[in-house]
Image (cartoon, rainbow, N blue to C red):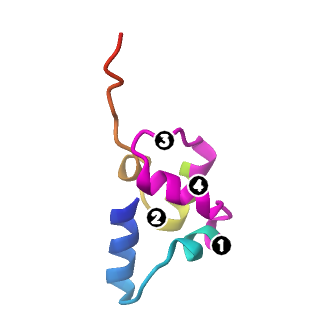
Amino acid sequence: MTELIADKAFQERRVVPLSEVAEATGIHRATLSKMANQPGANIGTDIIDKLCGYFRCQPGDLLTYLEDGGD
C-alpha cells in the first residue's frame, strides 16, 4: 500500500497522508497504519475493496502472499 500512496503522491505532485486515505475510504487510520507496517496483517475483503476503488487498482497491487512456514 505504501507504494500506491507514493505513486499517487508523485502523480498528483503532493503529499498524500494516511488521514486523507482514511477519510476518502472510510477505513480507520489505525487499520491503514497496520496494513502499511505489519506484513501479514489480517485485513478483510471489504477494506481491500475500498482501497482498490480509491487507488483504482487490483487486489494483487495491495496484497502479497506470505508463507506461514508451518504445515
Residue appearing at x 39%, y 86% in the figure: 12
Magenta segment: 23-47
- Which residue is disc 1 drawn over? 23
Residue appearing at x 36%, y 24% in the figure: 68
Question: Magenta segment: does it hold 62?
Answer: no
Residue 58 shows up from this direction: no
In the image, residue 43 sits, relative to residue 70, either above or below, namely below
The disc, 3 or 4, on the residue closer to the chain's N-terminal end is: 4
Q: Nearer the viewer, mark 2 or mark 4?
A: 4
- Which residue is disc 3 drawn over? 41
- Counting from the top left corner in percent of width and height, residue 18 is at 52, 71
Q: Are marks 3 and 4 in contact (CB under 8 Å)?
A: no
Q: Nearer the viewer, mark 3 or mark 2?
A: 3
Q: Are marks 2 and 4 in contact (CB under 8 Å)?
A: no
Query: What is the secondary structure assignment of the residue under circle 3?
Result: loop
Q: Is 50 left or right of 14, judged from the image as shown?
A: right
The disc, 2 or 4, on the residue closer to the chain's N-terminal end is: 4
The disc, 2 or 1, on the residue closer to the chain's N-terminal end is: 1
Q: Residue furthest bottom?
A: 13
**Which amino acid type is shown beneath numbered disc 1?**
Glu
- Which residue is disc 4 drawn over? 31
**Which amino acid type is shown beneath numbered disc 3?**
Ala
Q: Which mark is residue 2?
A: none
